[in-house]
Image: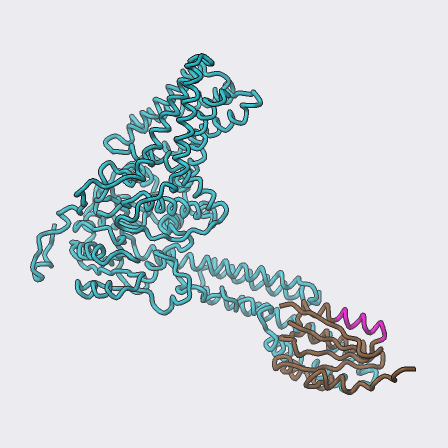
Amino acid sequence: MIAFRILAFANITAGILYLGWRYTASLNFDPRALWFSLLLVGAETYSFIDTMLFILMMWKPRRRKPPEPLPGKAVDIFITTYNEPVDLVRLTAEAALRIDWQPKHVYVLDDGARPEMAELCREISCGYIMRGEEWRGKPRHAKAGNVNNALIQTSGEFILILDSDQIPAPQILNQVMGYFHDPKLAFVQTPQYFYNLPPGDPFGSDAPLFYGPMMQGKDGWNAAFFCGSNAVLRREALMQIGLAEYATEVEKDMQSAIGRMRKEARRPGVTPAAGKAARIVLSEAARRARGMLAAGEPLEKAAEVLRQGGQKADDIQAEKDLEVIARELASLGEKGDTAAREASRSILWEMSTLAGSVARATSGTDSFSGRFEDERALDRSSEAMAVSAFSTISVTEDMATALRLHARGWSSVFHPEILAYGLAPEDLGTALNQRLRWAQGTLQVLFREKLLFRKGLTLAQRLQYFTTIYSYFSGFAHLIYVFSPIFFLVTGIAPVNAWTLDFVFRFVPFFIVNKAMYRLVTSGLSTRRTEQYTLCLYPLWIRAVLGAIFNKSVRFIVTPKGRQNRTSFSRVSVQAVTVVLTLAAVAVAVTQVAVGAQSVSIGILMNVGWALYNVTTLSVILRAVLYKAPKGWSPKPPAFLFPAVESKTRKRRVIQ
Amino acid sequence: MSLTVSVEQVTDSVVVFTLTGRLDAVGQLEVKTAFKERVQRGGTTLFVDLAAVTFIDSSGLAALVSGYKLARERGGTLKLAGMNKQVQSVFALTHLDRVFEISPDIDGLIAQVPKPPQGG
């Protein structure tokens, strides 16, 4: 850790010196070059901030050892499935039944409602849960909805969530349950590990940096992420955020209903006196309701106060109108209209009760009280379930759920031991879909719900979530990094005022210290692919950011397990074009040098080197399109997950 | 949602107002304005067709009463036709069904209007 902090310090110093020099002394103010110059220094600034966020993340990583288990706590094991093959689910479900823990209940959450899946569950005697009638015609909320649906039908104090392909190790609960001695702990996340990674991990699925140092770093700030599978959660925490979210939602609904009611009070045509009186009543009701919510009184009661306030406002409105009517009729009565006179008298006579009855008889959706009867009222009847523990706002429900837990003061743990073995996408197209979904979903959290501005998060926690979101903007920086050498080699217009030794002497130490720091963090891990894919996927990150900004809706795409059809080259056309352009730019520069139109300079050397680095890196994804698994390669989950077949009577014995 | 008012001048003094939609606090403004305008131009017998009114509230009632008053003050009247159940119940509640002459449909009212002398 000391070594890391020293390198981090050196990195920041070198970075500030370098960027300071870039801003003050290196910009190329030639009008043809200025925009290019600014873009590049902007991208470099982005990357430097990225590094600083990384340093913050890694400042005090937490390396955990499993504590004493917490015996006797009931655990429900949820296996979520939608369309995965029965045999795949069988592997996971049978392994779940073998988990060494009592009491436990295993449930397959089948969002596909398939008879053959129900049959499997009967055969191996585990629970089977599918959506009920109440979901008909209502938003289903994909996996989050599936889990929420199961939560209300089960009762175990803890929940182990597994994707259908994640085969758990028998000791998974023994290893992680001990953390729950801490009553404020909401969840323990363990790594996602893939047993089917093709040799060389051509699609960059392996994430040892994330499910290792990065999560440990986040854990140090009590900001470990929940990643949707291979995690144990405390039901109480989920229910609490579910209820709290529900309360917030209802409160929001109430506030907007109050807002609408108050606006209504100012609408044209309302007798000014009535409008004013109604506004006073409504504000009073709103204030009382808010006070009740703040005091933790039942929402039902607060809603009742509002409803009564609305009715009172309706009564006032009716009363004022009736007064006008009575006055007009009375003046006609004075002129001899007996019917008018009588009606006026009865109206005034009955006024105390009449206003109320008229208000009731005329309460439509536009009346003040009617504002509460719309579809987003207290019962939230537009939703199948009123209370959703798992966040349903985003297709990446996990991150939003974790964030909500953290914001409510719950803590989290990352346990670095691999305790479940799953499947990675086996073709590039599937891998790309998955990445796009994660990226877009994560960004949705930021843009749509402003979760990042939630009260209750510590600054460090907020920055951990921000880091994840920030990193998706790297696509734009990489776009600039990829096109910089092309532009320079072809046009000769430089983004710096001179490719001098001055530049080299400032850049190289910064570059070396930076690489050294990352190497230190990732030592012992194979993170080369991850690094390459960060650049390779730049068009995808850009698409995700734009999609989130322009509010393009993202559907929850179930990641297919197993190999799909061959990926089309069109999926990586941007990368292919980039490679071709880069090679062409190098060819142009080399030709110019060869014919003597230009002499070899530091600038040309550096940019050719840079261009070739880009080509090598991007070619990784182009090769991935053509990737074919070696003949006879058929990955199997580790054998220790499957103890020798035992007789049914012995099955209850502890399997370690 | 909102209210539309179409006005038809049957004779110099007889005007038919056909209301469509919700006669509530928003809709009543336009009705009042229409009444005022026609009464100023000499309309004294106002027929209001409520057959297409889906909803009325107390401010809608007040608007009809204001039209009634305008017409009466000029020696005329305001008659109503074609009420749905909700509208009827509000009229009964407020005893206004005893003030207004109410017909099942507008054609019945128009039929009562004496034909203006032809030619000449």
In the displayed orientation, state which residue is furthest to the right.
B120
On whether residue B33 falls in the magenta region, the answer is: yes
Q: Is residue A547 left or right of residue A167?
A: right
Q: Compared with residue A226, is residue A15 higher up or lower down, i.e. above or below?
A: above
The quadrant the C terminus of chain B occupies is bottom right
Closer to us: A252 or A96: A96
Q: Which x, y percent locates residue A289?
A: 52, 62
Q: Compared with residue A339, is residue B7 higher up or lower down, i.e. above or below?
A: above
Q: How is the image coloured?
A: by chain
On whether residue B74 falls in the magenta region, the answer is: no
Q: Residue at x 44, y 59 (%)?
A: A247
Q: Which x, y percent locates residue A85?
A: 24, 57
Which chain is tinted brown? B
Closer to us: A619 or A30: A619
Query: What shade has chain A been given?
Result: cyan
Q: Which x, y percent locates residue B113?
A: 80, 85
Instruction: Kindly indicate the quadrant of the structure image that contains residue A588.
Output: top left
Q: Which residues are magenta?
A: B32-42
Instruction: Kindly indicate the quadrant of the structure image that contains residue B40.
Output: bottom right
Q: Compared with residue B54, is residue A424 higher up or lower down, i.e. above or below?
A: above
